[in-house]
């Protein structure tokens, strides 16, 4: 009878230790889960901000001056190089037509 009680006591103690360690591990998991969710939110915000910034830069690079505003104060036409977009300027530079 004493042997059975001793075995039950040891088994209960082992189960208690295992439950205690499992509880500690789960609390660590919760902290890690909170940190990972904050990291995901931060990366999402960074991606959205970067995408918006690249969109604005793309709009600025592809924007062209409208034809009705393409005259100087004296009414003279603006040189074609001032109306050209970045791609047109690069192409003209490669062709050598921008050289004086």
Image (tube, rainbow, N blue to C red):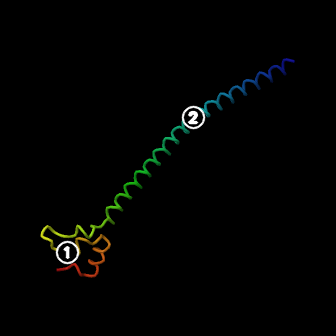
Q: Residue furthest right?
A: 1
- Quadrant assignment for the C terminus: bottom left
Say which residue appears at 73% left-offset and 28% top-offset: 15
Q: Quadrant of residue 8?
A: top right
Determine the CA span between mark 2 and mark 1. Answer: 67 Å
Between 1 and 52, which is closer to the camera in this rendering?
52
Provide the secondary structure element on which disc 2 rests.
helix
Q: Residues within 10 Å of mark 2 (few under 14, many from 20)?
A: few
Residue matched to label 2 = 28
In the rendered structure, the answer to whether residue 29 lies left or right of residue 83 reads right
Provide the secondary structure element on which disc 1 rests.
loop
In the rendered structure, the answer to whether residue 96 lies left or right of residue 24 reads left
Q: Residue 1: x, y in percent? A: 87, 18
Residue 58 position (above or below residue 6): below
In the rendered structure, the answer to whether residue 35 lies left or right of residue 58 reads right
Q: Residue 56: x, y in percent? A: 35, 57
Residue 92 position (above or below residue 51): below
Give whichever of discs 2 and 1 has the lower sequence position. 2
Say which residue appears at 23% left-offset and 67% top-offset: 69
Residue matched to label 1 = 79
């Amino acid at each position: 009878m004493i042997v059975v009680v001793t075995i039950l006591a040891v088994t209960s103690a082992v189960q208690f230790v295992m439950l205690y360690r499992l509880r500690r591990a789960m609390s660590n998991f919760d902290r890690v889960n909170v940190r990972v969710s904050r990291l995901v939110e931060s990366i999402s915000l960074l991606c959205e901000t970067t995408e918006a910034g690249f969109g604005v830069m793309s709009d600025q690079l592809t924007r062209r001056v409208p034809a009705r505003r393409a005259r100087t104060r004296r009414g003279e036409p603006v040189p074609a190089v001032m109306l050209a977009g970045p791609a047109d300027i690069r192409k003209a530079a490669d062709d050598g037509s921008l050289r004086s």
